[in-house]
Amino acid sequence: MLRKTRTASQLQDEVNRRIHRAPEVVEDGVKIRVPRPQMQEADASGCNWTMKHFGNAIGFERTVEAALKAVQKEYNLSEEVKDLGSLFGEPQKD
């Protein structure tokens, strides 16, 4: 399956959304901190990113892992680097 490409912020938002809509998280009213995705070499499945060190996730490890794996299966992290000096975040020119 071909993955869609998303920015780090978009991936973070999607993992956050999926975690916080899980019934057990909603029921307990817990707020889990979702870290920024980190680029990595593509794994055996072709995924090029991961997330580590979720905050306030004790007791919700399986929920967090399921949401992370589901998003990793659908999306890859965009490799486009933006020029941080540009006000509008235009792609960096070589």
Image (cartoon, helix red, strand yellow):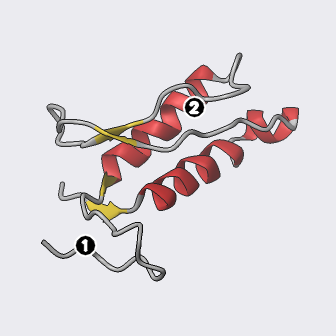
Amino acid marked by disc 2: Val
Real-space Cα distance between discs 1 and 2? Answer: 34 Å
Q: Residue furthest top?
A: 59
Residue 28 in percent (x, y) is at 86, 32
Residue in the picture at 50% in, 29% down: 65
SS category of the residue bearing label 1? loop
Residue sitting nearer the eye, 49 or 68: 49
Q: Quadrant of the N terminus?
A: bottom left
For the image, the number of numbered tags is 2
In screen coordinates, is 93 left or right of 24?
left
Which one is in front in this view, the residue at disc 1 or the one at disc 2? 1
Which disc number belongs to residue 64?
2
Of callouts 1 and 2, the N-terminal one: 2
Quarter of the image where one finds residue 90: bottom left
SS category of the residue bearing label 2? helix
Q: Residue furthest front?
A: 85
Q: Is residue 3 above or below residue 34?
A: below
Read off the residue under disc 1: 92
Q: Is residue 94 above or below residue 26?
A: below
CA neighbours of label 2 inside 10 A, class few (<14), some (14 to 19), many (20+):
many
Quarter of the image where one finds residue 80: bottom left
Q: Quadrant of the C terminus?
A: bottom left
Residue 51 in percent (x, y) is at 45, 34
CA neighbours of label 1 inside 10 A, class few (<14), some (14 to 19), many (20+):
few
Mark 1 and mark 2 residues within 8 Å of each other at the beta carbon: no
Residue in the picture at 17% in, 38% down: 42
